[in-house]
């Protein structure tokens, strides 16, 4: 299975929602489309599903042009953000829907539905109507319905965003495990970077209708290609060149552009009085359980540093800042 998107574009009125997207998805891939609200994620997913026609561009599945193929003939499974189960059908009937449409034998449908209910841990709930199920249970049924027909591609549009944190985290793992086991190529839209990092083999980071960068979670975090990606995936400080140069021993001369430094790459110490030492004062602290986030005022610039919760700093203290060598993230724009 090889899906290719080439030069996909879509505008509404004068506004461009998707601005020339190229993307390849292969067998067993779990790809997350990550980006801020309004950047075109849902539009792109719906174009792929065949629910929206692009203004231009090509979609190919194993070389076959899908661009003009209607949604119901693409053979893709789709799960949307809000519960999209048929409200007057039981959980089992919802899961069976696509199989019935394909006129599969009744006995085969019955055993497939039982198998899917088992797979999502809801064997006892087949006879329930959607409004007798919790949000998390409904999304598991929606997922079972989408994979019942063994789709060539699974499309998920923020399937977990309406759920509370604990259910969300547990469903992330379940979806991921199921996807790996069934090896269904999956494209999931999310605006939650932690979700994307936990689930994706590859993340497609979008901004204003365009792809900013594609890579593994580690590649995007450690080598972001733009300030946007650096700021969207994880926290980052942007420091003016002259300040960064005093922080980073390897930069003898001040770089012309701001330098990005991750909060965990910075160290705090009691000032030693050495010449050139970069000093700041502790402006605020947030205890986050496993870590302490310290906001430092460095010559009028806010700098966030993440340290161990046992660190001795207090608001108002003057501290000395340093950075690990290689901590600088530099951008050409
Ligand atoms: N049917 C439509 N008519 C006009 N404009 C639209 C339509 N659908 C989407 N847009 C616009 O296209 C842009 C992209 O919308 P889209 O729904 O793809 O964003 P998104 O990345 O999914 O955002 P969110 O994270 O909020 O769901 C937005 O500016 C939106 O207002
Ligand atoms: Mg959306």
Image: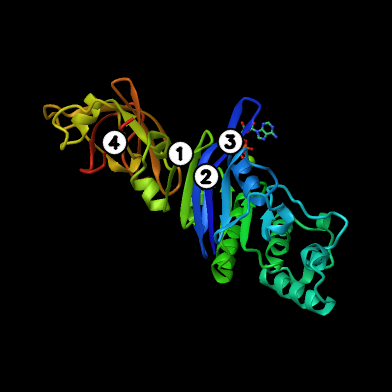
Nearer-the-camera pick, 57 or 301: 57
Q: Earlier in the sequence, mark 1 or mark 4?
A: 1
What residue occupies the far top of the structure in this picture?
300
Of marks 1 and 2, the one in the foreground: 2
Is disc 3's CB within 8 Å of ligand 1?
A: yes
Q: Which residue is mark 4?
A: 330
Q: Residue at x 14, y 28 (%)?
A: 273
Give the left or right position of residue 110, taking residue 325 as reference.
right
For label 1, the crowd category at 10 Å Cα-Cα, with few meaning under 14, some 14 to 19 and many 20 or more, is many
Q: Position of residue 264 (x, y in %)?
A: 33, 43
Q: Which residue is mark 1?
A: 232
Q: Earlier in the sequence, mark 3 or mark 4?
A: 3
What residue occupies the far left of the structure in this picture?
275
Is disc 4's CB within 8 Å of ligand 1?
A: no
Q: Are marks 1 and 2 in contact (CB under 8 Å)?
A: yes
- Write down the quadrant of residue 128 in the picture: bottom right
Q: CA distance from mark 1 to mark 3?
A: 12 Å
Is disc 2's CB within 8 Å of ligand 1?
A: no
Q: CA distance from mark 2 to mark 4?
A: 22 Å
Is disc 1's CB within 8 Å of ligand 1?
A: no
Q: Which residue is mark 2?
A: 34
- Does the rendering let one see residue 160? no
Which type of secondary structure does the marked residue at label 3 adopt? loop
Q: CA distance from mark 1 to mark 4?
A: 16 Å
Q: Which residue is mark 3?
A: 37
Ligand 1 lies in quarter: top right
Nearer-the-camera pick, 234 or 280: 234
- Does the rendering let one see residue 153? yes
Q: Earlier in the sequence, mark 2 or mark 4?
A: 2
Q: Earlier in the sequence, mark 1 or mark 3?
A: 3
Q: Residue at x 32, y 42 (%)?
A: 311
- Labels in figure, total: 4
């Amino acid at each position: 299975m090889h899906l290719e998107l080439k030069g996909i574009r879509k505008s509404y009125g004068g506004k461009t929602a998707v601005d020339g997207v190229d993307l390849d998805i292969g067998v067993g891939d779990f790809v997350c489309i990550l980006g801020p609200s309004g950047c075109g994620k849902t539009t792109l997913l719906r174009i792929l599903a065949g629910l929206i026609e692009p203004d231009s561009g090509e979609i190919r599945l194993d070389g076959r042009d899908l661009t003009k193929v209607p949604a119901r003939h693409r053979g893709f499974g789709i799960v949307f953000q809000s519960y999209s189960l048929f409200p007057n059908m039981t959980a089992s009937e919802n899961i069976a829907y696509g199989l019935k449409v394909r006129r599969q034998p009744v006995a085969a449908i019955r055993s497939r539905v039982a198998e899917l209910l088992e797979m999502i841990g809801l064997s006892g709930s087949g006879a329930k109507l959607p409004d007798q199920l919790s949000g998390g249970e409904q999304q598991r049924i929606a997922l079972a319905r989408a994979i019942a027909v063994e789709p060539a591609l699974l499309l998920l549009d923020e399937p977990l965003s309406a759920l509370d944190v604990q259910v969300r985290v547990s469903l992330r793992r379940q979806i991921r495990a199921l996807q790996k086991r069934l090896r269904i190529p999956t494209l999931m839209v999310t605006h939650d970077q932690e979700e994307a990092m936990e689930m994706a083999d590859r993340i497609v980071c979008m901004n204003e209708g365009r792809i900013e960068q594609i890579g593994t979670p580690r590649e995007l975090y450690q080598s972001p290609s733009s300030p946007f990606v650096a700021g969207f995936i994880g926290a980052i400080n942007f420091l003016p060149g002259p300040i960064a140069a005093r922080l980073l021993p390897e930069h003898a001369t001040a770089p012309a552009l701001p330098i990005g430094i991750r909060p965990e790459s910075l160290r705090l110490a009691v000032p030693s009085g050495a010449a050139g030492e970069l000093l700041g004062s502790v402006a605020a602290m947030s205890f986050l359980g496993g870590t302490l986030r310290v906001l430092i005022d460095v010559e009028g610039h806010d700098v966030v540093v993440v340290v161990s919760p046992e660190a001795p700093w207090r608001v108002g203290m003057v501290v000395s800042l340093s950075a690990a060598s290689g901590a600088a993230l530099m951008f050409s724009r």
